[in-house]
Image (cartoon, rainbow, N blue to C red):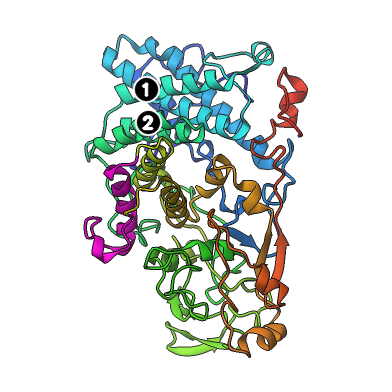
Amino acid sequence: MKRNILIASLGLLLMSSCGSLDLNPLSDGSGDTWNSTPEEIVMSLNGLYKDAFWMTDQDDWTDDFIYRDATSPIAGATINGETDFVKNWWTNSYKAIARANAVVQSVDRAAGSLSQTQISRYSAEARFVRAAMYSRLLSHYGNIVYTEAVLDIEEALKLKQMDKAEVLKKIYADFDSAIANLPKSYAASELKRATSGAALALKARIALQMNDWATARDAAKACMDQKVYRLHDNFSNLFISKTKNSPETIFGLPRSVALKVTLGGLQDYVTRNAGGWGAKDPSWDLFCAFLCKDGLPIDESPLFNPRKPFLNRDPRCAATIVEFQTIHLGYTYEPHPDTLKVYKVADNKYVENKDTRSVAIFASYNGLIWKKGVDGDWLLNSWQAEPDKIIVRYADVLLMYAEAKIELNEIDQSVLDAINMVRARAYGVAYTATASYPAVTTTDRTALRRILRTERRMEFAMEGVRYMDIIRWKIAGKVLNKPNFGLLDPADLRAKVTGPGLWFFPSVPPVDEDGVADFSAMYNAGQIKQIALRKFDESRQYVWPIPSTEVLISNLIQNPNY
C-alpha cells in the first residue's frame, strides 16, 4: 500500500468512450502545490484512468476455463498472501486511491480559475475512481483499510481495517457524488470521461456483490432510465478490435497498439493452424451451460444432439466457442482425430491440421477453442491487439436489475423484459418478437433465478464476470471442486469414441439447478479423460488474503485460514 503521494509524470490514457490525450507530463510536480491550475487537475484525473489501475477478474479463476493440465492459484486453491495478483491488486488499488484522495483534497487550490460547478465535477470524478477502487478491495479482500486522507508512512501504519458496512456506506457516498455532479454523456468533440451512468452501474455492481438488493435495483434502474446506453446491435462483433466506443459500453478503457497499451498473451487463445498454441480454452462445463434454442438445458431439450453439439444452441454458444467444421482465422476448425488435413482459405488448398491432437499433441486438450473477441487483427502487430477494455456494459446493468428484483421477490414484467432484451439481442431480434426466440415468460422465483444465472454465464463468458458471480452466489466450492475433463489420447479416442460413432460427446451430461454438468458417466465408462483437478477451499477462499507484507508491517489482521 502506497502511503504517500507525489504526482509527477502521468499516463496518457483516458477511458472509453475516449481517445488518448496528447499531453506532456510534468517531471517535477510537488504534492504541496500541485492541482493549483485546471491543467494540473485534468492531468491528475487523467492519471486515474491508467490501465494498470483497472484490473479485471480472470476466467481462469473459474469453471469456464481450461489451460491444459494447469490450474490458477484460485482454481488450484494455492492462493496466499504472496500470490502475485493478490499483492498487485492491493498495491495498485491503493495507489489509485492515494491519487484520488489528493485530487479531492487539493482541487480547491484552483478555485480562482474554476467555477464551483467545475470544482464539484472534478472532485466527483476523483471520488468515482476512489469508490471503484474501494469496491474492488471490499469485494475481493473483505477486511480493508479505508482512508480519504493523504497520509505519510507513519500515519498509514497506524490505520486499522474498517467495518465492511461502513466502507460500503462511504463507497455509496462517493458514487452518489459522481451521480450528482458528472454529466450523463459528452459531446462528440469532447474527450469522454467517467459519467453519472458509469457511477450508477458500478454502484449497482458493488451493491449486488454485497447482497444489497434494493440499492442494486435502484442504481441499475436509474442507469437504465437515463436512456443513454443501449445494447450493441451485434453480439459477435462487440468485442473485436475494430469496434470502438460501443453504445453498450458504460465504462471502459481504450487500448492502442501505437501507444503500446494492448491485449497481450494472444497466442494461447489462437488455433495452432493460425500460428497460436490453442492452450487456453473454454471448458466443457461452459460449453454445456449454453441453452438450446428452445430455452432448455441440453439434458432437457429434445433439440440437443451430442453428436452435433453446436446444433440448435443459443447463438452465443457459437459466438463464444469455435464451431467444428467452420472457418476460423482462415482455416477450417476441426479437432476430430481423423481429420488430418483442413482447408486453408488464403491458399485455397488443404494443409496439415495442427488443431487435432493426432497431429499436434498439445492442441486443445478438450477440442474447444475461444472465438469471442478473437479476430484476424490478433495475428498482426506481433501478437498485440487493441479491443476496448470493457469494465461494465449495459447488458450487465439489465441483468443486475433483473437479479436484484428476483432476490427481492419483486417479479414483474420489467424483470422479464430486462432478461429478454439481452437474450433477444443474441438472436438478432427485438425482445418484443417473442415468437422469434425463447422468450422468458415464467414468474416463478426459483425458475427465474436459475434462468438469470444461466443468462449471465452465456452472456459474459470470457469477460471476467463469472468469478464474482460464483463468489457471491456461494457456489464456487461446488463448481470448482471437480475435475476439468477433456479428450482421450488419440489412439484411445479412436477406439472408444470416434470408432463407435460417439463423437463429440459419447452421451448427454446431466445439468443440475446451478448449471453444473456431470461428466462422471462418460468418465467412468473410460470415454473421456481427467485433465486437471480443480480445488477451492471454502473455509477461506470466498475472500482473498491480505498481502503478507502488509500484515507484517502494519496493524492489519489477516483474513481467516490464510
Considering depth in this image, is 208 or 305 the residue closer to the camera? 305
Residue position marked by numbered label 1 in the rendering:
176
Residue 103 visible in image: yes
Residue 7 at x, y = what percent?
A: 51, 23
Residue 509 drawn at (x, y percent) = 58, 69
Magenta stretch, residue numbers: 411-440
Depth check: 554 or 402 in front?
Answer: 402
The CA distance from mark 1 to mark 2 is 8 Å
Residue carrying label 2 = 199
Residue, x 33% and y 62% (percent of image)?
A: 438
Instruction: State whether residue 9 appears in this view.
Output: no
- Residue 41 falls in image quadrant: top left
Q: Earlier in the sequence, mark 1 or mark 2?
A: 1
Question: Residues at badges 1 and 2 in contact (C-beta under 8 Å)?
Answer: yes
Q: In this rendered view, identify the residue nearer to me: 147 or 176.
A: 176
Q: Residues within 10 Å of mark 1 (few under 14, many from 20)?
A: many
Residue 474 painted magenta: no
* Amino acid beneath label 2: Ala
* Secondary structure mostly seen in the magenta stretch: helix
Label 2 neighbour load within 10 Å: few <14, some 14-19, many 20+: many
Pick out the residue farthest to the front: 444
Q: Secondary structure at mark 1?
A: helix
Residue type at numbered disc 1: Asp
Which residue does the image show at 23% across and 58% down from the upper left?
A: 430
Point out which mark residue 271 bears.
none
Q: Is residue 431 above or below residue 468?
A: below
Placement of the N terminus among the 4 image quadrants: top right
